[in-house]
Image (spheres, rainbow, N blue to C red):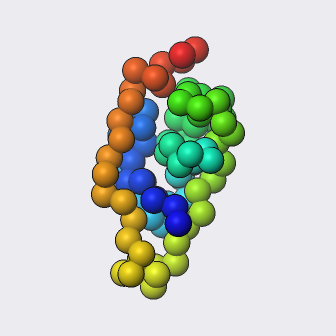
Amino acid sequence: MLQLRPNCECCDRDLPPASTEARICSFECTFCAACAQDRLGGVCPNCGGELLARPRRPAGKLAHNPASTQRVLKPAGCARGA
């Protein structure tokens, strides 16, 4: 099950479970759409994987399968050309 991490690793923007702006790689590194496109060119700076839209979990399923609350922030790895 996806963790649904709560923020962008680059800019720390909040990305709630229902956000259409969240992008993830196959390791679930999480970024906002703006950072994924403009800063990272659609490539995860951690693993080199493709960044795609994160699926949204239906609200009714969040009670028993909550999103993660652990924030991950690695702004140094998100510098242009990193």
How many numbered discs sit on the rendered protein? 0
Q: Is residue 81 above or below residue 37?
A: above
Across and down, in percent, residue 31 comes to 50, 42
Across and down, in percent, residue 81 comes to 58, 14
The answer to whether one can see residue 13 in this image is: no
Of residues 15 and 30, the one nearer the viewer is 30
The answer to whether one can see residue 4 in this image is: yes
Left or right of 13 in this view: 35? right
Across and down, in percent, residue 2 comes to 52, 61
Left or right of 59 in this view: 37? right
The C terminus - image quarter: top right
Q: Is residue 15 above or below residue 1?
A: above
Q: Is residue 21 above or below residue 58?
A: above
Across and down, in percent, residue 78 comes to 48, 25
Looking at the image, the residue that sits furthest to the bottom is 60
Q: Residue at x 38, y 30 (%)?
A: 74
Q: Residue at x 52, y 35 (%)?
A: 35
Q: Residue at x 46, y 23 (%)?
A: 77
Left or right of 29 in this view: 72? left
Looking at the image, the residue that sits furthest to the top is 81
Of residues 44 and 33, the one nearer the viewer is 44
Of residues 43 and 20, the one nearer the viewer is 43
